[in-house]
Image (cartoon, rainbow, N blue to C red):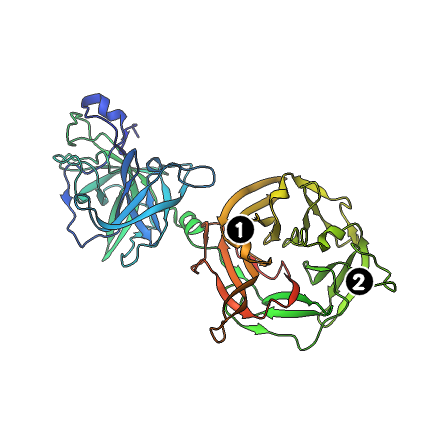
Amino acid sequence: MPRRTSRILALSATLVTGSVLTSLPAHAVSGGTTVPTGTSGYLARVSTPTKACSAALIDPSWVITSKGCLTADANGAPTENATISVGAVDVSTGAGTNAKVVRVVSRSDRDVALAKLDKPATGITPVALATTAPKNGDTLQLAGFGRTATEWVPARPSIASFSVSSVNATEVSATSASGSDTCLGDSGGPALRTVGDKVEVVAVNSRSWQHGCLAVTETRQGSTEARVDDLADWVRQNTVPTPVSCPNGAVIWDDLSDGNLYRHIHNDPANGTPSWTEPTKSSGNGWFGRPIAGKNGVIWDIHRSNGAGDPFGNGSLKMWKWDGTNLTGGKQVGDGWARYLTPEYQNRVTVDQAGRIFMVDDQGQLRVYIWDDAANWWVNGSGQVLDTGWTKYDSITGAGDGVLYARTPNGDLYRFQYDFAAAKWTQRDKLVGTGWNWFTGIFSPGADILYGRGSWGPSPWDGKNSPILRWYRYSANTDSWLPVNANGVSIATGWNTDLHATAAPDSCRLVP
């Protein structure tokens, strides 16, 4: 297909004509008709300090548009302020539902991007994505908020009929019998197809010759659309939280000041329902140190000596395992861990879903220790240094395969993920929350589910203010917390009397 001009409206551009204009982005349908107010509320307008575009609402929290409309850093954070307007939008009056863009996900193979809104566009019906390819001769309705044949900045979007003239793996060429094209500002707007009584997005406006647009003298015509009919899986992977499976609930251990250790089951960790199976008796005593749950029923005990008759000294690392009824084992497998018995370091040690022990040492290095089940000993007895500079974090929590949440003393929470097969970080220093310093402990059953203990709030049982356990679940693929308020979900009370709490990190897993 011939290269044509993109249709992003550069707000700072001066009025130009002829061939110079074809080097600029573009926006509205030159020969279209105005979309009546109260219809097609999914048509969206994108505006930034430097440009304006169009889009379509495909989910209450997401629009699909042209990737040239929005810029973002490597983590998907917008690099300039961008506002999405949907619903009964009227540019002349400011009417419509407005939201800020907080995340951008772009395709590498075509001119398509997803943009996440900072708040859902409630009361507006999203438009569906097509799941079958367009073909030659199909009639599409191209819509956008861009320039028309007579208006620089229309108050309402325009729409016009186009016929598909050719299709390739990523794009669609379309022409209009009236000779109209999409114009500056239409970039990212939807190419719509009606099937029965259903309207669906087949493609998004990418570029055109802008024939018939105000102040354009170009005689060539035709518009190019970026296909989206084959992107359903990609859209789902980036807009729908990955499902979580916790087949046996979450195993949570806590030790009390009398040295007794108890085993609890949170029955619905995937959804934060306050449903529990409580222990009827202690699972063991003498637990005055720092217990940390591992995979496959393992409990690591950073031991605190019980006195002269105790053969294990402070900082001995002991390994226990739950056999379904009792804790067995208890052999010493390491030494020199005494710093993790101190208030300063007790939250700087954790275990991930794969059973790896992570710790921040006294040099601020992040180390990982890996246990070999077959050899029944360490793969790396001295640990492996993964990173440095971790003195700034006072708490780390394993919450998946190589996933770590690290908290600063002021309560900022960051997400990391290390790919052990590739030996590299796939995410570093991703700020995902604030205010987490009200917790004395943060622990996880895996799958980016977090429990916070040590705060007060309403009991899930009677609503009275009490020390509670709070539940949170983060979705890494959508970069969002599940729809709960900033205070999480209160799922239990009385968690202020234990010394520590720890969850089996393989209790929950993401479902591919």
Of the pair 24 and 387, the residue shown nearer to us: 387
- Tell me: residue 304, above or below residue 258: above
**Label 1 sits on residue:** 411
Q: Position of residue 49 (x, y in %)?
A: 30, 35
Q: Earlier in the sequence, mark 2 or mark 1?
A: 2
- Tell me: residue 310, above or below residue 92: below
Of the pair 184 and 285, the residue shown nearer to us: 285
In the rendered image, the residue lying farthest to the left is: 150
- Classed neighbour count for the residue bearing mark 1: other residues with Cα under 10 Å, few (<14), some (14–19), many (≥20): some
- Number of numbered markers: 2
Q: Is residue 286 left or right of residue 184?
A: right
Q: Secondary structure at mark 2?
A: strand
Q: What amino acid is labelled 2 in the image? A: Gly
Q: Could you tell me which residue is drawn at 53 percent across and 57 percent down? A: 511
Q: Position of residue 337 (x, y in %)?
A: 76, 51
Is residue 421 something one can see in this rendering?
A: no
Q: Position of residue 241 (x, y in %)?
A: 46, 55
**Label 2 sits on residue:** 330
Q: Are marks 2 and 1 in contact (CB under 8 Å)?
A: no
Q: What amino acid is labelled 1 in the image? A: Gly
Residue 306: give its label.
Answer: none
Q: Is residue 314 left or right of residue 143?
A: right
